[in-house]
Amino acid sequence: MSSANLIRVALGAYLLIFFSYLLGPLVVMSLTAFNSSSFPTVSPWACFSYEWFDVLFNDKHIRDGIYYSIVIGIGTVILSVSMGLAASIVLTQVWPKLRSTYYTMIIAPILIPGVVLGISTLVFWDRAGAFLGATDGSFLHRLFHNGIFLTILGQSSFIASYAMLVFVARLQRFDTGLTEAALDLGATHTQAFRKILLPFMRPAIASASVLAFLASFENYNTTTFTIIDYKTLTTVLAQKVRLGINPSISSLAFIIIVLTIFAALAFEATNRNKERKMAVQQGKASAKKSGVLPGFMTGNPAAILLVLLAFVVIVLVGTAQKYSPEACKIQVREAKQIEIQQRIKELREARRIKDEARAAEEAEQPAQAPANAPQNSGAFGNVFAPGNLSEDDAPAPDPAPSSGTGAFGNVFDPNNLNSE
């Protein structure tokens, strides 16, 4: 094998291992969403079922968690994108000697653990309410102790740094001469920002918004301290994992994975279609349509995969209305009962064989004992046996002392002292 072929084989093996490591858990979790087993598992496979999707849609806690996660995500996007855009513009306008210090201060929240951010947010706004004189039941007290408000503030404190990095990367390609030309022509700073800078930053704003929403949606460390009386999807899932999970979590993961792939394919297909139209307008490609595929699918693999994915989803939704796994469940239940009964028989047979072997050993033990072994031998031999000492072997008692002899002789004998 030549060196080029060896490199290709090694590269292919590396890519296979890498993508298996990266996507393998997602594939396994997606499969467990369709297994009727009460615990997320692929092996042993019980029955193909859609029941866990029904369990997911009927779970009020998960529905509320998704709702509050979306609300908090939208609020975080508005606040963090605004803060990040402002910080990035200030970074380009600040005195050059202070840019490194300013940049470090803006990036610092990313390096702080989320637990610290959550606790500090909770404590700071509680003290701020007390400083402003917020009493129980007042608007400020309800605001500073509202879990949604505090979670938006806590998440935006570090997500704004991510948004700022996106904006800084975009601003490095901006020509400041355009703004200066607009100002020279009589435009105000607001008009220059709205008509020149903001359209230029529009792709970065979209990217930062998606990044901020996803970071907010999956955040747990900060949210768990600031959410207080509400529940987000991550906190609900964490609680379910502690108390015991079922495959409804896998069905939720499957839906999220499908939506993510669908959005990525739609974005890629849209970009490919725009590039194709621009190439046609510039004369670099022909506008001839294929007779087999529609125009937007011609030379666009992402669009083809998007249509296939949509078709698979439609088929799954259509079959879910008619398919019933009850017959399969009955067969699985009967097979398990037969397996349990067989296992019980094996255990009883093994116990019977063991009891017979023990009885045989106990029957052989007296025959193997030595003939001259003393009977009733204890730990101390026959020392304490009742018949160990006979009357002949007993030691003779000492001669009895004379009458009246006590422990002190005859000192206290009444006759020892006479009248003389």
Image (cartoon, rainbow, N blue to C red):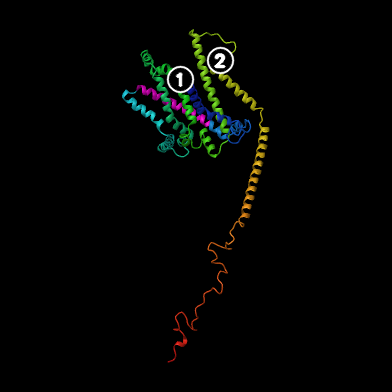
Residue 25 spot, x, y in % from top left:
53, 30
Of 116 and 39, nearer the camera is: 39
Task: Name the residue: 56% across, 72% down.
Answer: 390
Of 103 and 26, nearer the camera is: 26
Q: Is residue 224 above or below residue 90?
A: below
Of 328 and 251, nearer the camera is: 328
**Residue to which mark 1 is pinned:** 3
Q: Is residue 277 highlighted in magenta?
A: no
Q: Is residue 350 above or below residue 320?
A: below
Residue 76 spot, x, y in % from top left:
46, 28
Residue 255 spot, x, y in % from top left:
56, 28
Q: Is residue 76 highlighted in magenta?
A: yes
Of 253 and 135, nearer the camera is: 253
**Residue to which mark 2 is pinned:** 297
Residue type (three-letter) at the residue carrying disc 2 = Met
> Could you tell whether 241 is left or right of 315 in the image?
left
Q: Which residues are magenta?
A: 67-93
Q: Is residue 333 above or below residue 302?
A: below
Q: Residues within 10 Å of mark 1 (few under 14, many from 20)?
A: few
Mark number for residue 375? none
Residue furthest to the bottom in view is: 420
Q: How far is mark 2 from mark 1, CA to CA?
A: 39 Å
Give SS at disc 2: helix
Residue type (three-letter) at the residue carrying disc 1 = Ser
